Amino acid sequence: MTLIRIIKFAFQNIARNVWLSVITVSMLVMTLLTVNILLTLNVLANTAVESVEERIDVTVYFKDGTNPDLVAGAQASLIGLSQVRDAVRIAPEEALARFRARHEDDEAILSALDEVGENPFSYSLVVSARDASDFPTILSALENPSFAEFIEQKDFEDYEEVIGSISRVTQSVRWLGAVLAAVFLFISILIVINTVRVAIYIYREEISIMRLVGASSAFIRTPFWLEAVIYSLVATFITAGIAYPVLVSLERYADTFFYPANAGVLDFYLANGLLIFGLEFLILAVVNILSASLAMRRYLKV
Amino acid sequence: MCAHWRKLRVREARAASSWHASGAPDIVGVRGINLHVEPGEFISIVGQSGTGKSTLAKLLFAEERPSKGQIVIGGWDISNIRPREVPLLRRQIGVVFQDFKLLQKKTVFENTAFALEVAGVRPSRIREIVPQVLRIVGLDDKLHRYPLQLSGGERQRAAIARSLVHRPKILVADEPTGNLDAINAREIIDLLKKINSFGTTVVLVTHNREIVNGLRQRVVMLSNGEVASDVEHGRYKLA
Protein backbone atom coordinates (compact mmCIF):
# COMPACT_ATOMS: atom_id res chain seq x y z
CA MET A 1 0.00 0.00 0.00
CA THR A 2 2.81 2.36 0.95
CA LEU A 3 4.54 1.62 -2.37
CA ILE A 4 1.41 2.57 -4.31
CA ARG A 5 1.21 5.85 -2.37
CA ILE A 6 4.89 6.55 -3.02
CA ILE A 7 4.35 5.92 -6.75
CA LYS A 8 1.30 8.20 -6.64
CA PHE A 9 3.33 10.99 -5.00
CA ALA A 10 6.11 10.55 -7.60
CA PHE A 11 3.65 10.94 -10.48
CA GLN A 12 2.07 13.92 -8.71
CA ASN A 13 5.53 15.52 -8.55
CA ILE A 14 5.94 15.05 -12.29
CA ALA A 15 2.43 16.29 -13.10
CA ARG A 16 2.75 19.40 -10.93
CA ASN A 17 5.98 20.38 -12.70
CA VAL A 18 4.95 19.22 -16.14
CA TRP A 19 7.07 21.74 -18.11
CA LEU A 20 10.08 21.21 -15.93
CA SER A 21 9.62 17.48 -16.40
CA VAL A 22 9.49 17.95 -20.18
CA ILE A 23 12.74 19.96 -20.11
CA THR A 24 14.42 17.38 -17.87
CA VAL A 25 13.41 14.47 -20.09
CA SER A 26 14.44 16.41 -23.24
CA MET A 27 17.88 17.00 -21.83
CA LEU A 28 18.24 13.35 -20.87
CA VAL A 29 17.14 12.36 -24.39
CA MET A 30 19.81 14.66 -25.84
CA THR A 31 22.43 12.95 -23.69
CA LEU A 32 21.31 9.47 -24.70
CA LEU A 33 21.08 10.44 -28.38
CA THR A 34 24.67 11.71 -28.26
CA VAL A 35 25.82 8.46 -26.71
CA ASN A 36 23.96 6.47 -29.38
CA ILE A 37 25.37 8.60 -32.19
CA LEU A 38 28.80 7.76 -30.80
CA LEU A 39 27.94 4.07 -30.78
CA THR A 40 26.61 4.20 -34.34
CA LEU A 41 29.72 6.01 -35.47
CA ASN A 42 31.81 3.32 -33.86
CA VAL A 43 29.94 0.57 -35.71
CA LEU A 44 30.23 2.46 -39.02
CA ALA A 45 33.93 3.07 -38.49
CA ASN A 46 34.53 -0.62 -37.79
CA THR A 47 32.57 -1.57 -40.91
CA ALA A 48 34.58 0.93 -42.96
CA VAL A 49 37.90 -0.39 -41.68
CA GLU A 50 36.85 -4.00 -42.26
CA SER A 51 35.62 -3.13 -45.73
CA VAL A 52 38.89 -1.45 -46.62
CA GLU A 53 40.90 -4.28 -45.10
CA GLU A 54 39.01 -6.77 -47.21
CA ARG A 55 40.01 -4.83 -50.29
CA ILE A 56 43.70 -4.87 -49.49
CA ASP A 57 45.26 -6.66 -52.38
CA VAL A 58 48.19 -6.53 -54.79
CA THR A 59 47.66 -7.46 -58.41
CA VAL A 60 50.75 -8.95 -59.95
CA TYR A 61 50.81 -8.95 -63.76
CA PHE A 62 53.13 -11.47 -65.40
CA LYS A 63 54.85 -10.91 -68.71
CA ASP A 64 53.25 -12.24 -71.89
CA GLY A 65 53.95 -15.89 -72.49
CA THR A 66 54.91 -16.68 -68.92
CA ASN A 67 54.60 -20.39 -68.24
CA PRO A 68 51.36 -21.10 -66.33
CA ASP A 69 53.28 -23.55 -64.11
CA LEU A 70 55.59 -20.76 -63.00
CA VAL A 71 52.55 -18.60 -62.15
CA ALA A 72 51.08 -21.53 -60.20
CA GLY A 73 54.38 -21.91 -58.37
CA ALA A 74 54.40 -18.24 -57.47
CA GLN A 75 50.77 -18.58 -56.29
CA ALA A 76 51.67 -21.54 -54.05
CA SER A 77 54.70 -19.74 -52.68
CA LEU A 78 52.62 -16.67 -51.77
CA ILE A 79 49.76 -18.68 -50.20
CA GLY A 80 52.38 -20.28 -47.98
CA LEU A 81 53.01 -16.90 -46.34
CA SER A 82 51.14 -16.28 -43.12
CA GLN A 83 50.53 -12.65 -44.09
CA VAL A 84 48.66 -13.65 -47.26
CA ARG A 85 44.97 -14.29 -46.91
CA ASP A 86 44.52 -15.51 -50.47
CA ALA A 87 46.21 -15.48 -53.87
CA VAL A 88 43.93 -15.94 -56.85
CA ARG A 89 45.33 -16.80 -60.23
CA ILE A 90 43.58 -15.17 -63.18
CA ALA A 91 44.13 -16.64 -66.61
CA PRO A 92 44.32 -14.30 -69.65
CA GLU A 93 40.92 -15.52 -70.93
CA GLU A 94 39.27 -14.82 -67.59
CA ALA A 95 40.91 -11.39 -67.37
CA LEU A 96 39.58 -10.55 -70.83
CA ALA A 97 36.08 -11.75 -69.93
CA ARG A 98 36.11 -9.66 -66.75
CA PHE A 99 37.35 -6.61 -68.65
CA ARG A 100 34.62 -6.98 -71.24
CA ALA A 101 31.97 -7.40 -68.54
CA ARG A 102 33.23 -4.35 -66.68
CA HIS A 103 33.15 -2.17 -69.78
CA GLU A 104 30.11 -3.65 -71.49
CA ASP A 105 28.53 -0.20 -71.75
CA ASP A 106 31.67 1.47 -73.07
CA GLU A 107 31.59 1.08 -76.84
CA ALA A 108 34.90 2.94 -77.36
CA ILE A 109 36.88 0.61 -75.13
CA LEU A 110 35.26 -2.52 -76.53
CA SER A 111 35.95 -1.45 -80.13
CA ALA A 112 39.54 -0.60 -79.19
CA LEU A 113 39.86 -4.09 -77.76
CA ASP A 114 38.50 -5.53 -81.00
CA GLU A 115 41.03 -3.45 -82.92
CA VAL A 116 43.85 -5.14 -81.02
CA GLY A 117 42.52 -8.46 -82.24
CA GLU A 118 44.32 -10.74 -79.80
CA ASN A 119 43.97 -11.08 -76.03
CA PRO A 120 46.15 -8.33 -74.57
CA PHE A 121 45.98 -9.80 -71.04
CA SER A 122 48.55 -12.04 -69.48
CA TYR A 123 48.46 -14.18 -66.33
CA SER A 124 47.98 -12.26 -63.13
CA LEU A 125 47.79 -13.00 -59.40
CA VAL A 126 45.49 -11.10 -57.03
CA VAL A 127 47.14 -11.35 -53.63
CA SER A 128 45.09 -10.22 -50.63
CA ALA A 129 46.78 -9.44 -47.32
CA ARG A 130 45.48 -10.16 -43.84
CA ASP A 131 46.33 -6.69 -42.64
CA ALA A 132 47.45 -3.41 -44.16
CA SER A 133 50.71 -3.65 -42.26
CA ASP A 134 51.54 -6.90 -44.12
CA PHE A 135 52.17 -5.08 -47.37
CA PRO A 136 55.94 -4.72 -47.06
CA THR A 137 56.39 -8.47 -46.42
CA ILE A 138 54.22 -9.39 -49.42
CA LEU A 139 56.04 -6.92 -51.67
CA SER A 140 59.43 -8.28 -50.62
CA ALA A 141 58.17 -11.86 -51.21
CA LEU A 142 57.43 -10.85 -54.79
CA GLU A 143 61.15 -10.12 -55.22
CA ASN A 144 61.77 -13.89 -55.11
CA PRO A 145 64.36 -14.54 -57.89
CA SER A 146 62.51 -17.64 -59.11
CA PHE A 147 59.67 -15.51 -60.53
CA ALA A 148 60.62 -11.86 -60.04
CA GLU A 149 62.01 -11.53 -63.56
CA PHE A 150 58.64 -12.65 -65.05
CA ILE A 151 56.68 -9.97 -63.26
CA GLU A 152 55.77 -7.08 -65.49
CA GLN A 153 53.89 -4.87 -63.05
CA LYS A 154 52.74 -4.74 -59.41
CA ASP A 155 49.58 -2.76 -58.81
CA PHE A 156 48.65 -1.81 -55.27
CA GLU A 157 47.31 1.09 -53.26
CA ASP A 158 48.53 2.29 -49.93
CA TYR A 159 45.53 1.09 -47.91
CA GLU A 160 47.41 1.58 -44.67
CA GLU A 161 47.17 5.30 -45.29
CA VAL A 162 43.42 5.03 -46.01
CA ILE A 163 42.81 3.02 -42.82
CA GLY A 164 44.96 5.47 -40.88
CA SER A 165 42.84 8.36 -42.15
CA ILE A 166 39.60 6.60 -41.22
CA SER A 167 40.95 5.85 -37.76
CA ARG A 168 42.14 9.42 -37.24
CA VAL A 169 38.83 10.96 -38.31
CA THR A 170 36.86 8.43 -36.26
CA GLN A 171 39.02 9.04 -33.23
CA SER A 172 38.52 12.80 -33.46
CA VAL A 173 34.76 12.43 -33.86
CA ARG A 174 34.70 9.98 -30.94
CA TRP A 175 36.52 12.48 -28.73
CA LEU A 176 34.20 15.28 -29.78
CA GLY A 177 31.19 13.04 -29.15
CA ALA A 178 32.48 11.97 -25.76
CA VAL A 179 33.03 15.60 -24.75
CA LEU A 180 29.55 16.47 -26.03
CA ALA A 181 28.01 13.55 -24.12
CA ALA A 182 29.85 14.60 -20.94
CA VAL A 183 28.60 18.19 -21.34
CA PHE A 184 25.02 16.99 -21.87
CA LEU A 185 25.32 14.66 -18.87
CA PHE A 186 26.59 17.50 -16.70
CA ILE A 187 23.73 19.76 -17.82
CA SER A 188 21.29 16.87 -17.20
CA ILE A 189 22.60 16.46 -13.65
CA LEU A 190 22.12 20.17 -13.00
CA ILE A 191 18.62 20.07 -14.48
CA VAL A 192 17.62 17.02 -12.42
CA ILE A 193 18.95 18.72 -9.27
CA ASN A 194 16.95 21.83 -10.14
CA THR A 195 13.80 19.82 -10.94
CA VAL A 196 13.94 18.05 -7.59
CA ARG A 197 14.71 21.35 -5.84
CA VAL A 198 11.62 22.96 -7.41
CA ALA A 199 9.52 19.90 -6.53
CA ILE A 200 10.72 20.15 -2.93
CA TYR A 201 9.81 23.85 -2.93
CA ILE A 202 6.35 23.20 -4.36
CA TYR A 203 5.84 20.35 -1.90
CA ARG A 204 7.30 22.15 1.11
CA GLU A 205 3.94 22.55 2.85
CA GLU A 206 2.96 18.94 2.20
CA ILE A 207 6.39 17.73 3.30
CA SER A 208 6.23 19.69 6.56
CA ILE A 209 2.78 18.21 7.28
CA MET A 210 4.03 14.73 6.35
CA ARG A 211 6.80 15.11 8.93
CA LEU A 212 4.36 16.43 11.47
CA VAL A 213 1.99 13.49 11.17
CA GLY A 214 4.74 10.88 11.31
CA ALA A 215 5.81 10.10 7.75
CA SER A 216 9.15 8.35 7.68
CA SER A 217 12.11 9.95 5.96
CA ALA A 218 12.06 7.16 3.35
CA PHE A 219 8.39 7.83 2.61
CA ILE A 220 9.18 11.50 1.95
CA ARG A 221 12.37 10.89 -0.05
CA THR A 222 11.44 7.87 -2.15
CA PRO A 223 9.00 9.73 -4.48
CA PHE A 224 11.86 12.05 -5.50
CA TRP A 225 14.12 9.08 -6.24
CA LEU A 226 11.33 7.39 -8.11
CA GLU A 227 10.75 10.59 -10.07
CA ALA A 228 14.41 10.49 -11.16
CA VAL A 229 14.02 6.85 -12.27
CA ILE A 230 10.81 7.64 -14.18
CA TYR A 231 12.58 10.48 -16.01
CA SER A 232 15.38 8.07 -16.96
CA LEU A 233 12.94 5.41 -18.15
CA VAL A 234 10.88 7.85 -20.25
CA ALA A 235 14.06 9.36 -21.74
CA THR A 236 15.36 5.88 -22.66
CA PHE A 237 12.07 4.92 -24.36
CA ILE A 238 11.94 8.21 -26.29
CA THR A 239 15.57 7.77 -27.38
CA ALA A 240 14.87 4.22 -28.56
CA GLY A 241 11.75 5.50 -30.35
CA ILE A 242 13.79 8.17 -32.15
CA ALA A 243 16.76 5.89 -32.80
CA TYR A 244 14.89 3.05 -34.57
CA PRO A 245 13.48 4.96 -37.60
CA VAL A 246 16.73 6.99 -37.87
CA LEU A 247 18.78 3.77 -37.91
CA VAL A 248 16.53 2.21 -40.57
CA SER A 249 17.05 5.24 -42.85
CA LEU A 250 20.75 5.44 -42.06
CA GLU A 251 21.20 1.76 -42.79
CA ARG A 252 19.70 2.24 -46.26
CA TYR A 253 22.20 5.00 -47.12
CA ALA A 254 25.13 3.30 -45.43
CA ASP A 255 24.45 0.00 -47.24
CA THR A 256 24.72 1.80 -50.59
CA PHE A 257 28.00 3.30 -49.46
CA PHE A 258 29.49 0.03 -48.21
CA TYR A 259 28.07 -2.16 -51.02
CA PRO A 260 28.48 -5.09 -51.35
CA ALA A 261 29.14 -5.20 -47.61
CA ASN A 262 26.41 -4.45 -45.07
CA ALA A 263 26.78 -1.35 -42.86
CA GLY A 264 25.59 -3.47 -39.91
CA VAL A 265 24.29 -0.63 -37.73
CA LEU A 266 20.71 -1.85 -37.65
CA ASP A 267 21.83 -5.45 -37.14
CA PHE A 268 24.06 -4.28 -34.29
CA TYR A 269 21.15 -2.52 -32.58
CA LEU A 270 18.70 -5.36 -33.22
CA ALA A 271 21.14 -7.83 -31.68
CA ASN A 272 22.28 -5.63 -28.77
CA GLY A 273 19.47 -3.05 -28.43
CA LEU A 274 18.07 -4.46 -25.21
CA LEU A 275 21.50 -4.53 -23.62
CA ILE A 276 22.46 -1.07 -24.94
CA PHE A 277 19.26 0.72 -23.89
CA GLY A 278 19.07 -1.31 -20.68
CA LEU A 279 22.59 -0.23 -19.72
CA GLU A 280 21.92 3.36 -20.76
CA PHE A 281 18.78 3.37 -18.60
CA LEU A 282 20.64 1.88 -15.64
CA ILE A 283 23.52 4.36 -15.82
CA LEU A 284 21.15 7.29 -16.31
CA ALA A 285 18.93 6.14 -13.43
CA VAL A 286 21.92 5.82 -11.09
CA VAL A 287 23.22 9.27 -12.09
CA ASN A 288 19.75 10.79 -11.62
CA ILE A 289 19.20 9.09 -8.26
CA LEU A 290 22.54 10.53 -7.10
CA SER A 291 21.53 13.98 -8.44
CA ALA A 292 18.18 13.76 -6.63
CA SER A 293 19.96 12.70 -3.44
CA LEU A 294 22.26 15.68 -3.77
CA ALA A 295 19.28 18.01 -4.18
CA MET A 296 17.49 16.44 -1.19
CA ARG A 297 20.59 16.63 0.96
CA ARG A 298 20.82 20.32 0.18
CA TYR A 299 17.17 21.35 0.19
CA LEU A 300 15.11 18.73 2.00
CA LYS A 301 15.27 18.86 5.76
CA VAL A 302 13.73 15.65 7.07
CA MET B 1 0.34 1.70 24.51
CA CYS B 2 -0.54 1.55 28.15
CA ALA B 3 -1.70 4.41 30.36
CA HIS B 4 1.79 5.42 31.42
CA TRP B 5 2.41 6.45 27.82
CA ARG B 6 0.24 9.46 28.53
CA LYS B 7 2.73 10.49 31.20
CA LEU B 8 5.17 13.23 30.34
CA ARG B 9 8.30 14.35 32.16
CA VAL B 10 10.59 17.22 31.34
CA ARG B 11 13.66 17.31 33.56
CA GLU B 12 16.09 20.23 33.67
CA ALA B 13 15.46 20.79 29.97
CA ARG B 14 17.34 23.47 28.17
CA ALA B 15 16.96 24.29 24.48
CA ALA B 16 17.67 27.13 22.15
CA SER B 17 14.62 28.75 20.65
CA SER B 18 13.81 27.88 17.06
CA TRP B 19 14.83 31.31 15.83
CA HIS B 20 18.31 30.84 17.17
CA ALA B 21 20.58 31.95 14.37
CA SER B 22 23.81 30.04 13.85
CA GLY B 23 26.83 32.08 14.81
CA ALA B 24 24.74 34.33 17.03
CA PRO B 25 25.09 34.20 20.80
CA ASP B 26 23.19 31.25 22.31
CA ILE B 27 19.64 32.49 22.73
CA VAL B 28 17.99 30.22 25.21
CA GLY B 29 14.37 29.23 24.51
CA VAL B 30 13.88 27.34 27.75
CA ARG B 31 16.21 26.48 30.61
CA GLY B 32 16.01 24.44 33.77
CA ILE B 33 12.43 23.41 33.04
CA ASN B 34 11.07 20.69 35.33
CA LEU B 35 7.62 19.34 34.55
CA HIS B 36 5.86 16.14 35.38
CA VAL B 37 2.53 15.55 33.68
CA GLU B 38 0.34 12.66 34.78
CA PRO B 39 -1.70 10.56 32.33
CA GLY B 40 -4.99 12.23 31.40
CA GLU B 41 -3.99 15.65 32.70
CA PHE B 42 -5.01 18.89 30.99
CA ILE B 43 -2.15 21.32 31.39
CA SER B 44 -1.91 24.86 30.10
CA ILE B 45 1.49 26.34 29.38
CA VAL B 46 1.12 30.09 29.50
CA GLY B 47 3.29 33.12 29.30
CA GLN B 48 3.92 36.13 27.18
CA SER B 49 5.36 35.94 23.66
CA GLY B 50 8.98 34.84 23.60
CA THR B 51 8.94 33.13 26.97
CA GLY B 52 9.68 29.69 25.47
CA LYS B 53 6.16 28.19 25.30
CA SER B 54 6.47 27.05 21.68
CA THR B 55 10.03 25.84 22.22
CA LEU B 56 8.76 23.67 25.07
CA ALA B 57 5.95 22.34 22.83
CA LYS B 58 8.47 21.58 20.05
CA LEU B 59 10.62 19.66 22.53
CA LEU B 60 7.66 17.37 23.18
CA PHE B 61 7.29 16.23 19.56
CA ALA B 62 11.04 16.34 18.83
CA GLU B 63 10.94 19.32 16.51
CA GLU B 64 13.61 20.74 18.83
CA ARG B 65 16.24 18.81 20.78
CA PRO B 66 17.28 19.80 24.28
CA SER B 67 20.90 20.84 24.60
CA LYS B 68 20.73 19.69 28.23
CA GLY B 69 18.33 17.73 30.39
CA GLN B 70 15.84 15.03 29.61
CA ILE B 71 12.42 14.71 27.94
CA VAL B 72 10.67 11.47 28.81
CA ILE B 73 7.36 10.50 27.30
CA GLY B 74 5.78 7.40 28.77
CA GLY B 75 9.18 6.06 29.79
CA TRP B 76 10.73 6.82 26.40
CA ASP B 77 13.62 9.25 26.72
CA ILE B 78 13.37 11.32 23.55
CA SER B 79 16.18 13.73 24.49
CA ASN B 80 18.51 12.12 21.98
CA ILE B 81 15.91 10.52 19.76
CA ARG B 82 17.28 9.13 16.50
CA PRO B 83 15.88 10.69 13.30
CA ARG B 84 14.32 7.41 12.19
CA GLU B 85 12.44 7.16 15.51
CA VAL B 86 10.85 10.62 15.19
CA PRO B 87 7.99 9.39 12.92
CA LEU B 88 7.13 6.72 15.52
CA LEU B 89 6.99 9.39 18.24
CA ARG B 90 4.82 11.65 16.11
CA ARG B 91 2.32 8.90 15.54
CA GLN B 92 1.88 8.81 19.33
CA ILE B 93 1.59 12.55 19.86
CA GLY B 94 -1.08 14.66 18.19
CA VAL B 95 -0.04 18.20 17.35
CA VAL B 96 -2.26 21.18 16.55
CA PHE B 97 -1.05 24.62 15.51
CA GLN B 98 -2.44 28.12 15.33
CA ASP B 99 -2.23 28.14 11.51
CA PHE B 100 -4.01 24.75 11.16
CA LYS B 101 -1.46 23.42 8.65
CA LEU B 102 -4.10 21.93 6.37
CA LEU B 103 -3.47 21.14 2.71
CA GLN B 104 -5.63 23.51 0.70
CA LYS B 105 -6.05 21.13 -2.24
CA LYS B 106 -7.33 18.31 -0.09
CA THR B 107 -10.81 17.95 1.37
CA VAL B 108 -11.46 17.58 5.09
CA PHE B 109 -11.60 13.80 4.61
CA GLU B 110 -8.36 13.75 2.59
CA ASN B 111 -6.54 16.02 5.04
CA THR B 112 -7.54 13.76 7.90
CA ALA B 113 -6.74 10.60 5.96
CA PHE B 114 -3.33 12.00 4.98
CA ALA B 115 -1.88 11.25 8.43
CA LEU B 116 -2.91 7.62 8.05
CA GLU B 117 -1.79 7.35 4.43
CA VAL B 118 1.78 8.41 5.20
CA ALA B 119 1.86 5.82 7.96
CA GLY B 120 0.93 3.09 5.49
CA VAL B 121 -2.56 2.35 6.85
CA ARG B 122 -4.82 0.32 4.54
CA PRO B 123 -7.54 2.28 2.65
CA SER B 124 -10.32 0.16 4.15
CA ARG B 125 -9.08 1.04 7.65
CA ILE B 126 -8.80 4.72 6.66
CA ARG B 127 -12.42 4.70 5.44
CA GLU B 128 -13.35 3.31 8.84
CA ILE B 129 -11.30 5.62 11.10
CA VAL B 130 -11.67 9.01 9.40
CA PRO B 131 -15.49 9.32 9.60
CA GLN B 132 -15.36 8.27 13.27
CA VAL B 133 -12.83 10.98 14.12
CA LEU B 134 -14.65 13.60 12.07
CA ARG B 135 -17.83 12.74 14.00
CA ILE B 136 -15.99 13.40 17.29
CA VAL B 137 -14.90 16.87 16.11
CA GLY B 138 -18.32 17.61 14.58
CA LEU B 139 -17.30 17.72 10.94
CA ASP B 140 -19.01 14.56 9.77
CA ASP B 141 -21.29 16.63 7.53
CA LYS B 142 -18.37 18.46 5.89
CA LEU B 143 -16.20 15.57 4.74
CA HIS B 144 -15.85 16.83 1.19
CA ARG B 145 -15.35 20.51 1.89
CA TYR B 146 -11.99 22.12 1.18
CA PRO B 147 -10.28 24.18 3.92
CA LEU B 148 -11.16 27.42 2.14
CA GLN B 149 -14.84 26.48 2.35
CA LEU B 150 -14.64 26.20 6.14
CA SER B 151 -14.69 28.74 8.96
CA GLY B 152 -11.59 29.19 11.11
CA GLY B 153 -13.09 27.07 13.87
CA GLU B 154 -13.96 24.29 11.43
CA ARG B 155 -10.45 24.34 10.01
CA GLN B 156 -9.02 23.92 13.49
CA ARG B 157 -11.46 21.06 14.08
CA ALA B 158 -10.19 19.42 10.89
CA ALA B 159 -6.62 19.87 12.12
CA ILE B 160 -7.58 18.34 15.47
CA ALA B 161 -9.27 15.44 13.66
CA ARG B 162 -6.05 14.80 11.75
CA SER B 163 -4.06 14.82 14.98
CA LEU B 164 -6.47 12.27 16.49
CA VAL B 165 -6.45 9.60 13.77
CA HIS B 166 -3.51 7.79 15.35
CA ARG B 167 -5.35 7.79 18.72
CA PRO B 168 -2.54 9.75 20.38
CA LYS B 169 -1.99 9.48 24.11
CA ILE B 170 -0.82 13.09 24.23
CA LEU B 171 -2.21 16.05 22.31
CA VAL B 172 -0.03 19.16 22.07
CA ALA B 173 -2.01 22.23 21.01
CA ASP B 174 0.22 25.22 20.27
CA GLU B 175 -1.95 28.37 20.33
CA PRO B 176 -4.91 26.54 18.74
CA THR B 177 -7.22 29.50 19.27
CA GLY B 178 -4.78 32.16 18.14
CA ASN B 179 -6.54 32.72 14.82
CA LEU B 180 -10.10 32.33 16.09
CA ASP B 181 -12.79 34.61 17.44
CA ALA B 182 -14.05 34.14 20.99
CA ILE B 183 -16.96 31.82 20.07
CA ASN B 184 -14.87 29.53 17.86
CA ALA B 185 -12.07 29.58 20.44
CA ARG B 186 -14.52 28.44 23.12
CA GLU B 187 -15.71 25.61 20.87
CA ILE B 188 -12.17 24.42 20.24
CA ILE B 189 -11.38 24.44 23.95
CA ASP B 190 -14.57 22.46 24.58
CA LEU B 191 -13.40 19.98 21.98
CA LEU B 192 -10.00 19.69 23.67
CA LYS B 193 -11.77 19.09 26.99
CA LYS B 194 -13.87 16.41 25.34
CA ILE B 195 -10.74 14.73 23.97
CA ASN B 196 -9.15 15.00 27.43
CA SER B 197 -12.21 13.34 28.93
CA PHE B 198 -11.49 10.29 26.74
CA GLY B 199 -8.18 9.98 28.64
CA THR B 200 -5.83 11.84 26.32
CA THR B 201 -3.27 14.05 28.02
CA VAL B 202 -3.66 17.59 26.64
CA VAL B 203 -0.87 20.15 26.66
CA LEU B 204 -2.32 23.50 25.70
CA VAL B 205 0.12 26.28 24.87
CA THR B 206 -1.58 29.66 24.91
CA HIS B 207 -1.36 33.24 25.99
CA ASN B 208 -5.12 33.65 26.09
CA ARG B 209 -5.95 34.56 29.69
CA GLU B 210 -9.71 34.11 29.43
CA ILE B 211 -9.40 30.59 28.09
CA VAL B 212 -6.93 29.51 30.74
CA ASN B 213 -8.95 31.01 33.56
CA GLY B 214 -12.12 29.37 32.22
CA LEU B 215 -10.50 25.96 32.24
CA ARG B 216 -9.63 25.83 35.94
CA GLN B 217 -6.96 23.20 35.24
CA ARG B 218 -3.25 23.03 35.95
CA VAL B 219 -1.40 26.11 34.73
CA VAL B 220 2.34 26.31 34.19
CA MET B 221 3.55 29.83 33.63
CA LEU B 222 6.81 30.44 31.80
CA SER B 223 8.87 33.54 32.12
CA ASN B 224 12.18 34.06 30.35
CA GLY B 225 12.32 30.37 29.47
CA GLU B 226 11.87 29.22 33.06
CA VAL B 227 8.91 27.95 35.03
CA ALA B 228 7.65 30.93 36.99
CA SER B 229 4.75 29.08 38.56
CA ASP B 230 3.07 25.69 38.37
CA VAL B 231 -0.38 25.67 39.97
CA GLU B 232 -3.04 22.97 40.11
CA HIS B 233 -6.40 24.55 39.14
CA GLY B 234 -4.52 27.75 38.49
CA ARG B 235 -5.24 31.02 36.78
CA TYR B 236 -3.26 33.05 34.32
CA LYS B 237 -2.15 36.18 36.11
CA LEU B 238 -0.32 38.86 34.25
CA ALA B 239 3.07 39.52 35.76
Image (cartoon, coloured by chain):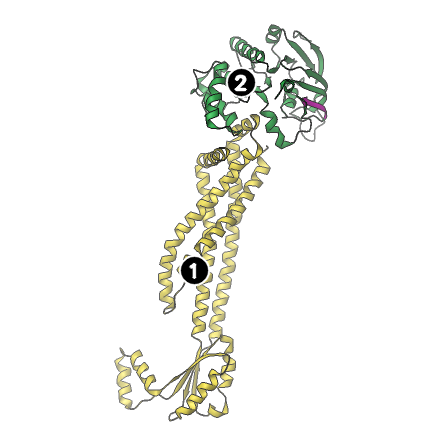
Chain colours: A yellow, B green
Q: Chain of mark 1?
A: A
Point out residue A273 in the picture as x, y percentages from the top left corner: 43, 55
Kind of element beneath mark 1: helix
Let me know if residue A302 is in the magenta part. Answer: no
Let me know if residue B70 is in the magenta part. Answer: yes
Point out residue A293 in the picture as x, y percentages from the top left corner: 57, 40
Pointer 1 residue: A268
Pointer 2 residue: B160
**Horizontal placement of A35 versus B228: left or right?**
left
Q: Quadrant of residue B2?
A: top right
Q: Chain of mark 2?
A: B
Q: What separation in Å lies between label 2 and label 1 (alpha carbons)?
A: 63 Å
Dominant secondary structure of the residues highlighted in magenta in the image: strand
Q: Residues within 10 Å of mark 2 (few under 14, many from 20)?
A: many
Evaluate if marks 2 and 1 touch, with contact meaning CB atoms under 8 Å apart.
Answer: no
Indicate the amino acid at tag 1.
Phe
| Residue B224 visible, this angle | no
Q: Residues within 10 Å of mark 1 (few under 14, many from 20)?
A: few
Magenta region: B68-72
Indicate the amino acid at tag 2.
Ile
